[in-house]
Amino acid sequence: MAELGTFSLLLAVAAAAWAVGAAALGVRRETFLRSAEGALRGALLSLTVASVVLVALFLTRDFSVRYVAEYSDLALSTPYTVAAFWAGQDGSLLLWAWLLAGLAVHTARRHRWRDPELLPVVVLTLAAVLLVITALVAFTSNPFERLGFVPDDGAGLNAMLQNWGQLYHPPATFAGYVGFTVPFAFAVAALVTGRLDDRWIRTVRVWMVVSWLLLTFGILLGARWAYTELGWGGYWAWDPVENASLLPWLTATAYLHSAVVQERRGKLKVWNVSLVIATFVLTIFATFLVRSGVASSVHAFAESSAGMYLLGVVVAVVVASALLVVWRLPMLRGHRDPIAPVSREAAFVLTNLLLVGFTLVVFWGTLYPVIMSVVRGTDVTVGAPFFDRMSVPFGLLLLAVLAVCPVVAWRRASARGLGRRVAVPFGVGLVVGAVAAVLDGGSNVVTVLVVSLSAFALVTIASAFWQALRVHRSERATGVAVGHLFARNPRRWGGAVVHLGIVLLIVGVALDATYRSDERITLTVDETGTVGGYALTFASLDSEMSANRAALSATLAVAREGSGRPLGTIVTERSLLANQDQPRTSVGVRSLLREDVYVILEEVDVDSRTASFNVFLHPGVLWLWVGGGLLMLGGVLAVWPYRGRPAVGAGGDAAAVPVLVAPAAPRSDDPEVP
Amino acid sequence: MAVGLAAALLFVVVAVLVAWPWVGPLVRDGGDRHQPDALRPRRVDEAGGRLGAEGATAHLDEVAARVSRGDRDGEATGPVDAGSGVSGGDLDGEATGPVDAGSGVSEGDLDGEATGPVDGGSGVVGGVADDGAVGDVEALIAARRARMTGRVCPACEQPRSPSDVVCSRCGAPLPRLEEVAR
C-alpha cells in the first residue's frame, strides 16, 4: 500500500507541474486555465489518496514503513495513532500540501467569475507553491519510504506529543500558514497584471481574516497545551518556533489594519502588498525554523534536512517579490494628500509601525543566536528576559493606541473634539490606575500602567459600542439592535470584540508575569496544606498500570482557606509511557476568576502515601484564555456571512438607513425641503 | 494487484481532470467548443445570483440583471460601485467613492463615521465621530431646514418670529417669509 502512497505523491507533483505550465498559458487561452484548475483538482485527489494511505498505514501498524515505525507503536491509542500523521516532518509537509491543494481548488472555483483578470496568475502562484511543497514531500520527505526490514514494534510517539494538543494544534497552525498563501497569490497577481486598485485588497480580506483566525486558534491551542504539559515552558516561552508562528501573525494583524486605510483612503499600497508578501514569506520561514534545527527549540523533534531547501524558497520568494514591487512602484503610489496627524488613518499607521517594529524585534531576537553561531562560531542564547523587556514598550504603546483609535474620526479630527471624547475613558483609566498603584504598593509601574491603559481602552470600546447601540435601540429591541449592529458593520464591531480580547489577554499576561508565586508542599493522603489563601487536601493517590503506560495520579481538593468553601478538585499525574525513557508530568489546574491554582506532582513515596507538590498561583491567567476566546469570536463575527443582513442602500434605497438621509446640499427632489 | 489497479484508476481520473477542457465538450456537446463552457448564458442562469463579478457582468446585465447589484455573498461588485443605485455604499455597508464624493450622504458615511465634508466645514466639525455623528447630522438638517424656510436669521441663525423685520440679535434685515417660500 505504501507504493500507492508514493505513486500518489509523484502524481500530485506531476499534476502541480502541469498546473503551473497550463496556468502560465492560461493567461492568454482560457482553455489552458481550465486545465490548470483540473490539474489542481487532480493534485488534491492524489494528495487525498496519499493521506488516506498514510492513515491506513498507521492504523494497520505497518512498521515496514519508516515514518510509521518512527512515530507510532503497538500500544499507541487510536486518536494519537491518527495524529502521528503530523508528528514528524514528512507527514506535516504532506498535511500542508493537502491543505494547500484543497485551498487552491476552492480559490480557483470561488474566484473564477469574480476575479477573471487575476485568476490565471493566482492559479499559477498557488500551483507553483503547491509544486514546491509536493516536490519537497515526494523527493526529500517521503513518508512512504520502506525500511527494508520489519521491526516488531515502532519507536512510539514522543511522550510530550501524547496530549490533546497534538490532535488540534498542528493542523490549525498549518491551516493558518497555508491560508496566507491565497492573499500572497492575489498580491502577486495584482502586481503582475498591474491591477493594483482596491479590488484585490477587498478580495483577500476574507482570506486574510480566516487565515489569521486559524493561526490565532493554532497559537492559542499551542499555548494552552504548553501551559498544561510540563516541559514546554508555560503558555509562552519565547521559544524560536513559538516566535516563528508569532511573526506572520503580527504582520497579518498589521495588514488587517493598514488594508482598511487603503480601502478607505487609497493609501499605503506599497505597505499593504509588502505586508501580504512578508506574511507568506514568514510562514515559510517558520517552517524552515522548525525543520532546519538552526535554532535551539523545544520543537527540535521535527528537525530534518528540508530546512535548507525551504531557506532557498524563502530567498527566491523574497527576491522575486521585491523585484515585482519595485517594477510596479509607479502604480503603487497612493493619493498624495498627507495623512493628518490626528486621524483614524494616523492611528492605524502607528499601530502598523508598532506591530512591524515588534515583528523585527522578535525576528532579530530569534535569529541572533543563529547569526552569531554562523558568523563567530559562538553559542549565544537570547532568552525570555530579552523578549519580555522588549515587548513592554510595544505592548504599552499598542494599548494606548487601541484605547484612542475607536474615537478618532477618519481624515481629520480636531484635538479638542478628540479630547472631549476620550476625557471620560481616560479619567476612568487614571482612577483604575491609581487604585492598582495603591494595591500594588507602587513597585510594579509597568503592570499598573497596563491595568490603567486597559481600563481606558475597555471604557472607550464600551462607550463606542453603547453610542452606536443607542442609535439602533431607538428603532428596535436591544437584542435585535445588537444583532443589527454586527450585521450592519461586522468588520467594525468584530474588530471591537477582537480588541476587547487583546486587552484582556495583555492584562492576564501582565498580572501573571508580575504576581505569580509558587510554594512547595509535601502532604500525606488526607492531609491538608495551605498555599496563598487556598487549602489543598491530598484526597487520593491512584496508580494505573497498562500495556501502554504506568501512571501515578494525585487528586487534591481545593477550598478557600478560612471559610472552607470548596472550589473543586485538581488531578496531577506522573506517567511513563511504553517505549519512552522520560517520565511525563501532567499538570493539574483549577482556574478561578482571580487566579489559577496550578499543581505539579514532583515526588511520590507510594509506601508512605506521601507526595511533594509544587503549587503555583497564576493570577489573571483565566483572562488570558477569555481574551483568546474573544479574539476568535471577534474574528468570526468580522467575517460572518450575515444572510439577510440590512442591505445598506441596496436597490438605491438610501433612506433605508437613517444616517443617510442628511443631504449635503438642498436637493430639489427632497420633499421636505422647499 | 489491488494497489496497481488503484494507482491506474487514480492516474486515469487525474488525466481526465487535466484534459477535461478539451475532452468535456466532446463528451457533452458533440464538439461544440466555440464558446468556453462556463461562460455560456445557460451557466449564468444556473448560477443566478452567485455571479456578479466583472468577468460575467456582460452576460449578467443581459440575462440576469437582477444580480448586478452584488453577489449572494454580500460582496459589492463592479456594477454596484458604478452607479446601479447603491452608490451610497457597498453591500458590506462600507462607504464607497460616491459617498465621500458627495452623493447625498456626505455628512457621514455608512459607518456613521464623519467623512471629509463633515470635517471640512459642514457644520458638524468636532462633535462628529462614529455613530455619535447621527445626532449632529440630524441637528444640521434641522438647522438647514430652518434656514431654508426662513425661520432663522440667515446671518446669525437666531430664531425669528414671522413678524420680525430685523434680527433681534445681529440686527440684520430679515426677508419676509413669503419671499423665502417663493
Image (cartoon, coloured by chain):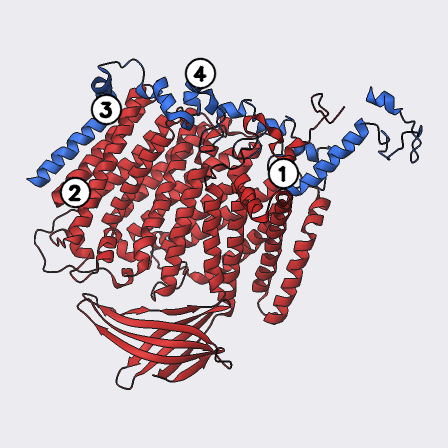
Measured Cα–Cα span from mark 2 to mark 1: 56 Å
Which of the marked residues, 1 or 3, is nearer the chain's N terminus?
3
Q: Nearer the viewer, residue A375 or B36?
A: B36
Are discs 4 and 2 both within one chain? no
Can you tell which quarter of the image residue A195 is in?
top left
Query: In the figure, A62 relative to B60: above or below?
Result: below
Residue occupying image coordinates x 22% and y 35% = A13
Most extreme residue toward the bottom is: A608
Are discs 4 and 1 both within one chain? yes
Measured Cα–Cα span from mark 3 to mark 2: 25 Å
Give the structural element (helix, strand or loop) at label 2.
helix
Which residue in the protein does label 3 denote? B20
Which chain letter matches label 1? B
Which residue in the protein does label 4 denote? B62
Of the residues tagged 3 and 2, which is closer to the observer? 3
Of the residues tagged 4 and 1, which is closer to the observer? 4
Q: Amino acid at mark 4?
A: Glu
With B86 as the anchor, is A633 left or right in this view?
A: left
Q: Which mark is residue A5?
A: 2
Which chain letter matches label 4? B
**Rendering coords of residue A160 (x, y %):** 29, 62
Q: Residues within 10 Å of mark 1 (few under 14, many from 20)?
A: many
With A33 as the anchor, is A282 left or right in this view?
A: right
Of the residues tagged 4 and 2, which is closer to the observer? 4
